Image (cartoon, rainbow, N blue to C red):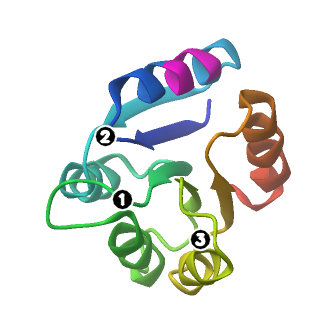
């Protein structure tokens, strides 16, 4: 079973994502900020991280994404950025940080599942 970490500071969005992913038979963990995300990622080593860009704490989503992709142990972890920031510059910043995908809120849960499925070939 694939492990997915949801990193989102809005509890209602975390709950919706969790319910969607658990229904699709993923093992789901969630945290509400970048600091906790970095700690959990290093301990659990999820297959996929759904990562909000703007969060409270020392680490933004872009920071956590960079840390994951720069880590030899975690560089194969797939990162999908989930954000309200949809400008071309924002998208480029996300891709420069190493994101595998970039979804702009609001997005459908079906679209998210499609994106995760499209990445599955890259997941070990």
C-alpha span from label 3 to label 1: 15 Å
Residue 85 picture location, percent across and down = 54, 62
Asked if the residues shown at circle 2 and circle 1 are in contact, with their CB atoms under 8 angstroms apart, the answer is yes
Q: Which residues are magenta?
A: 16-20
Sequence-wise, the earlier of marks 2 and 3 is 2
Mark 1 packing: few (<14 Cα in 10 Å), some, or many (20+)? some
Instruction: Judge from the rendering whether residue 44 lies leftward or rightward of residue 91; answer left or right.
Output: left
| Residue of label 3 | 99
Residue at x-position 66% and y-position 62%: 102
Residue 113 location (% of width, % of height): 76, 35
Tell me the number on the disc at residue 9. 2
**Residue to which mark 1 is pinned:** 54
Give the vertical position of 53 relative to 6 (above or below). below
Q: Quadrant of residue 72?
A: bottom left
- Dot 3 lies on which element? loop
Q: Residue at x 15, y 58 (%)?
A: 57
């Amino acid at each position: 079973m694939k492990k997915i970490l949801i990193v989102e500071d809005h509890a209602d969005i975390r709950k919706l994502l969790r319910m969607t992913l658990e229904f699709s038979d993923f093992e789901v963990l969630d945290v509400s900020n970048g600091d906790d995300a970095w700690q959990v990622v290093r301990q659990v080593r999820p297959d996929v991280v759904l990562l909000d860009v703007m969060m409270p704490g020392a680490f933004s989503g872009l920071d956590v994404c960079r840390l994951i992709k720069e880590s030899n142990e975690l560089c194969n972890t797939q990162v999908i950025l989930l954000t309200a920031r949809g400008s071309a510059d924002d998208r480029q910043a996300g891709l420069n940080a190493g994101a595998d995908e970039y979804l702009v809120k609001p997005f459908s849960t079906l679209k998210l599942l499609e994106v995760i499925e499209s990445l599955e070939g890259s997941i070990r």
